[in-house]
Amino acid sequence: MSTQGAGGFRSGAGRPKGALGEKTLAVQAKLEKLDCDPIEALAMIAKDTNNTAELRFQANKELAQYIAPKRRAVEMDAAIDGGIKVNLLSFADMGKLEEDKDKAESLTYESTEK
């Protein structure tokens, strides 16, 4: 029978924050023994133009996780207390807009709720 409580926080118990676990260390040791660098291998796949575009895309997608965080959905709760102005532009008119910026059309939507 245990003389301690039913668990909970105990000072100094467990793995220190940021320290790698046994399995992670074992995998790292095995990869080092095999002289294998998975990041380098993915980069080589991504750069090899003989690979299919889909394979190169997947390799780049995996590598991107190491330099840029994944985007998360952001919930927005906002109240609109006035009108909304919407500028309508078409790609076909973009050249014309560069020549004459006064030709941009605007559509103003007034909120029915105040």
Image: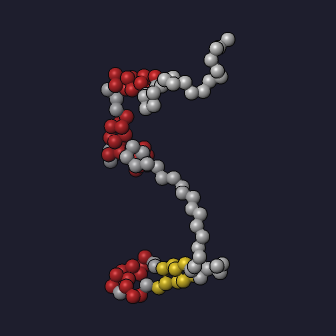
Reply above or below: 12 against 3: below
Residue 36 placement (x, y as % from top left): 34, 29
The quarter of the picture where residue 9 lies is top right
Residue nearest the viewer, comparing 16 with 75: 16
Observer-nearest of 50 and 75: 75
Tell me the quadrant of the picture where the C terminus can be found: bottom right
Q: Nearer the viewer, residue 109 or 41?
A: 109
Judge by depth and name the residue closer to the eye, 40 or 53: 40
| Residue 31 image offset from top left, x and y in percent | 37, 26
Image height of 73 relative to 17, above or below: below
Residue 23 visible? The answer is: no
- The colour scheme applied to this rendered structure is secondary structure
Residue that appears at 45% across and 27% down: 16
Residue 37 occupies which quadrant of the picture?
Answer: top left
Query: In the rendered view, does 40 fall on the left or right side of 65?
Result: left
Q: Is residue 31 left or right of residue 6?
A: left
**Count of numbered marks:** 0
Tell whether 29 sits left or right of 78. Answer: left
Q: Position of residue 8 (x, y in %)?
A: 60, 27
| Residue occupying the point 34% across, 42% down | 43
- Which quarter shows the N terminus? top right
Residue 27 position (above or below residue 56): above
Farthest-out residue, right: 1
Image position of 59 (left or right of 35): right
Q: Residue at x 59, y 73 (%)?
A: 80
Q: Which residue does the image show at 43% across and 84% down from the upper left?
A: 104
Q: Is residue 112 visible?
A: yes
Residue reaching furthest to the top: 1
Residue 22 point in image, percent of width and height: 46, 22
